[in-house]
Amino acid sequence: MNEGDVIEILRSGFYATIAMTSAPLLAALVTGLVISVLQALTQIQEMTLSFVPKILVTLVVTMLSLPFAFAALRSYVEEIMQRIVGL
């Protein structure tokens, strides 16, 4: 195994991590922005108003994106196993 193989494994690991976490993080970002705009427009400065919807939306999006996340993780692990067998 040379440096190119290690870099390729790390690159695909970073891609798998981004693929698994991008949907929930993007949902939390959008929810936070929407709640912040609503708080600024209505001048309601309740702290729990921003956390509860963000947690609920992130949980729902995480549950909906689990098959895609597991598929990305599975393909990464299969790639690692193929490299181990190839040694």
Image: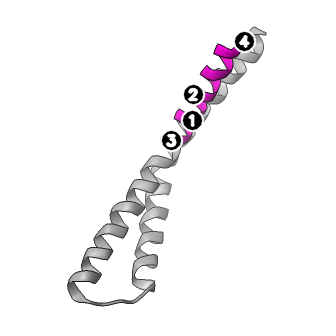
- Could you tell me how far apart the alpha carbons at marks 4 and 2 are, in whole angstroms? 14 Å
Q: Magenta residues? A: 1-19
Residue shown at 40% from the left, 78% from the top: 50
Residue count near mark 2 (Cα–Cα under 10 Å), binned few <14, some 14–19, many ≥20: few
Whether pointer 1 and pointer 4 mark residues with C-beta atoms closer than 8 Å, the reply is no
Looking at the image, how many numbered discs can be counted on the residues? Answer: 4
Mark 3 or 4: in front is 4
- Residue 38 drawn above or below residue 4: below
The Cα–Cα distance between marks 1 and 4, rounded to whole angstroms, is 19 Å
Give the Cα separation between the discs numbered 2 and 1. 5 Å
**What secondary structure is marked by label 2?**
helix
SS class of the residue under badge 1?
helix
From the image, tell me which residue sits under label 3.
18
* Mark identifier at residue 2: 4
Q: Is residue 49 above or below residue 55?
A: below
**For mark 2, what is the residue?**
11
Question: Answer yes or no: do the residues labelled 3 and 4 have beta carbons within 8 Å?
Answer: no
Confirm or deny contact between disc 3 and disc 1 (CB under 8 A).
yes
What mark, if any, has residue 14 been given in the picture?
1
Kindly indicate whether the residue at mark 2 contacts the one at mark 3 (C-beta within 8 angstroms). Answer: no
Of mark 3 and mark 2, the one earlier in the sequence is 2
